[in-house]
Image: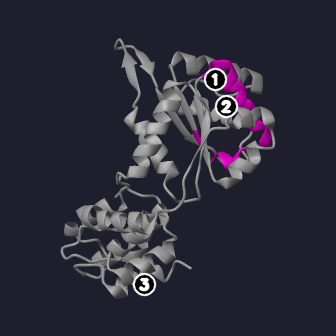
Amino acid sequence: MKGNDDLLPWVQNLWGKEPIPDEMQPAIKRLITPQIVERELMALIHEWLDFQRLSKQPGRIVAPPRTGKSISCDVYKLLNKPHRANGRQRVIPVLYLQVPGNCSPGELLTLILEQLNYGASTGTTTALRQRVLRVLKEYKVEMLIIDEANFLKLNTFSEIARIYDLVRLSIILVGTDELDSLIKRNEYVHDRFIECYRFGILSRQEFRDLVQVWEEEIIQLPVPSNLTQEQTLMKLYEKTGGKIGLLDRVMRKAGLLALKQGAKKIDKEILNEVLGRFE
């Protein structure tokens, strides 16, 4: 069984040495497989990304951790899939990548080449840069989205700004508030990425609507769990801080625990057991 890297070990631990009944396999697969729940926020981010891409403008997306910025960008990439022009030339409209901690200029350039499956990715920074510039043009990349950009080394930002100056494609940096403090240390970088799309945690009403969607479209247990009742909703909101990523984790784990216990819904005891681990 394949699925969410975070949930699969949890499922294996939950069942231990017990075999998972065949009839539960489809439900478990659904609960551990990442799914997209459309939100108004995601649509608004995509509209902004469309404008930046078509106008070849750089910018940044800033939001707290686990609020949906990464999934919104990943979905945007999926909505603008690679294709072949005239049946031959490979075209990649949107290139999305997540960078590792303390990412240096050389590591970033290598990562871009690896994401594009483009030959050798070794050599000096200058050689790697020339290769990246060539392949970005060759594959007609219109937008480069760099997620977890707050993990970049300071001199890597200058490398990114240099790529923008040389290729003039839209480059979007995605990260937390720490990203702001980093790029503001360098006027050359800040001037290029000065346009910012910023958002925060879900409002109470957005959170309520999302809980209902999760329960009906993803959890799908035989009996309604009524998780939008005020007392339950308040507890969920307080534990997750209104963050979409944490809500997703709670809901899926609660659904899996209900399956393991043979319950037809997520009752108070099941929800409390899962929430008890969120300190």
Q: Dot 3 lies on which element?
A: helix
Q: Toward the viewer: 11 or 53?
A: 53
Residue 19 belongs to magenta span: no
Query: Which quadrant of the view contains residue 134?
Result: top right
Q: Which of the two labelled residues, at mark 1 and mark 2, occupies the earlier sequence position?
A: 2
Residue type of the residue flagged with mark 2? Leu
Q: What percent of the width, then of the height, locates residue 121?
A: 65, 28
Per the rendered image, the range of residues in magenta is 146-168
Q: Quadrant of the C terminus?
A: bottom right
Say few, some or many: other residues with alpha carbon within 10 Å of mark 1 (under 14 / 14 to 19 / 20 or more).
many
Position above or below: 278 against 170: below
- Residue 105 appears in the rendering: no
Q: Which of the two labelled residues, at mark 3 and mark 2, occupies the earlier sequence position?
A: 2
Residue at which label 3 appears: 273
Q: Toward the viewer: 1 or 68?
A: 68
Q: Residue at x 48, y 54 (%)?
A: 68
Residue at which label 1 appears: 132
